[in-house]
Amino acid sequence: MSSTAIPSWMTLAADRVTVKLTVPSEANGVRVDTLSLRTPTVRDLRIARQTAPNDEEQQDLNLFASLAEVGTKDLDGLTLKDFNRIQAGYFRLVREDELQPQGAEATG
């Protein structure tokens, strides 16, 4: 499997990533088995940094909660594996597009 393959538990769109949770969790008082993050804006990043200037972990929680439109306590209730999936989805969503066309091989 290549590093660009999308895991089966992730659905990626241009403006959103949806992650299938391994364990259903509560989000906004509702039991869910997936969480979606919208594409962040620069404003989202700035607000997350301002709300917890000396705590990168809290900045991430604030940012992911905002993008998922859930409370930080909802994210606190996720299993570590599911939180890691949320992080992976976020980084896949914001990474730069591929520089080579799909299927092109690097020469060297």
Image (cartoon, rainbow, N blue to C red):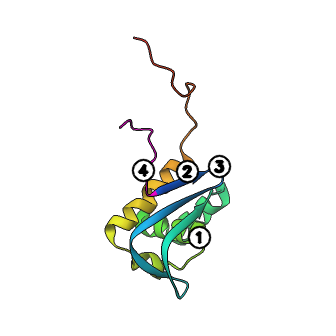
Looking at the figure, which quarter contains the C terminus?
Answer: top left
Q: Residue at x 53, y 88 (%)?
A: 29
Q: Amino acid at mark 2?
A: Leu
**Left or right: where does residue 71 sit relative to residue 80?**
right
Q: Amino acid at mark 4?
A: Pro
Marker disc for residue 7: 4
- Tell me if residue 54 can be seen: no
In the image, residue 7 lies in the stretch drawn in magenta: yes
Q: Position of residue 91 (x, y in %)?
A: 48, 51
Labels 1, 3: front one: 3
How far apart marks 4 and 3 lie (CA) works out to: 16 Å
Q: Which residues are magenta?
A: 1-9
The residue lying furthest to the left in this view is 80
Q: Amino acid at mark 1?
A: Ser
Marker disc for residue 93: 2
Local SS, label 1: helix
How far apart marks 1 and 4 lie (CA) works out to: 24 Å
Q: Position of residue 33 (x, y in %)?
A: 47, 73
Marks 1 and 4 close (CB-CB < 8 Å): no
Q: Earlier in the sequence, mark 1 or mark 4?
A: 4
Marks 4 and 3 close (CB-CB < 8 Å): no
Q: Residues within 10 Å of mark 4 (few under 14, many from 20)?
A: some
Local SS, label 3: loop
Residue located beneath label 3 in the image: 14
Q: Decide: is 16 above or below 79.
A: above
Q: Quadrant of residue 63?
A: bottom right
In the image, residue 76 lies in the stretch drawn in magenta: no
Q: Residues within 10 Å of mark 3 (few under 14, many from 20)?
A: few
Q: Residue at x 55, y 24 (%)?
A: 100
Q: Amino acid at mark 3?
A: Ala
How far apart marks 4 and 2 lie (CA) works out to: 13 Å
